[in-house]
Image: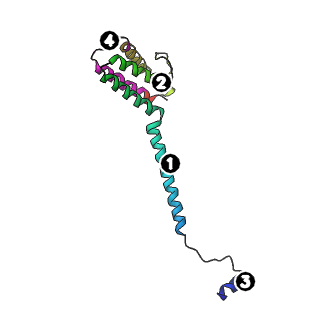
Amino acid sequence: MSEQKTILQEGIADILVHVPASPESWFSVHNLLVIIGLLLLIVIVWRFFFSPRSRSLRMLSNRVAAAVSREDYTGAVFSIASVVCARVSTNRLDRKTELPASLLDQMERWESFISKINSSRYSALENNIKEVQDLSKEAAFWIRKWR
């Protein structure tokens, strides 16, 4: 003890004995990693369940399934059109709807989809579940791709 006092008194106070890390510092790093992991998980869950695209896709499948279970195929087509309208943020689906820049090369597919959905909405679809399924798949494509 007297040796330590003499060393400190002689001006070698900048050389200190290494103190090992306390367990509390490891615990705080561990907590930080857990918090970052939880935040990452929250972002992934939000993107999967609560993004506008995911909500539109769930709405599409729920509405089409409900209409098909009632054997209301025309209602299913109207439901498809309303969900696509909501996702596209427009009141009407027509060929003049502006596509995003990333989808300009898909203009012919858009026009084909619009003509199919318009002809299906205003014609009798008795027991034509195949056409409803095709329109639903095409609508899901547009919901996924639209930005």
Q: Give the mark, 2 or 4, whose residue is nearer the N terminus.
A: 2
Main SS of residues in magenta: helix
Q: Secondary structure at mark 3?
A: helix
The image quarter in which residue 114 lies: top left
Quote the CA–CA distance across marks 3 and 1. 51 Å
Quote the CA–CA distance across marks 2 and 4. 24 Å
What is the basis of the colouring in this image?
A: rainbow
Residue 27 position in % (x across, y down): 51, 63
Q: Residue at x 52, y 56 (%)?
A: 32
Q: 90 or 144, which is in the foreground?
A: 90
The amino acid marked with disc number 4 is Ala
Q: Which residue is mark 3?
A: 9
Residue at the limit of the structure toward the top, as seen here: 123
- Residue 124: mark: 4
Q: Nearer the viewer, mark 3 or mark 1?
A: 1
Q: Which residue is mark 2?
A: 86
The amino acid marked with disc number 3 is Gln
The image quarter in which residue 124 lies: top left
Q: Residue at x 72, y 83 (%)?
A: 9
Q: Secondary structure at mark 2?
A: helix
Q: Give the mark, 1 or 2, whose residue is nearer the N terminus.
A: 1
Q: Residue at x 49, y 16 (%)?
A: 96
Quote the CA–CA distance across marks 3 and 4. 101 Å
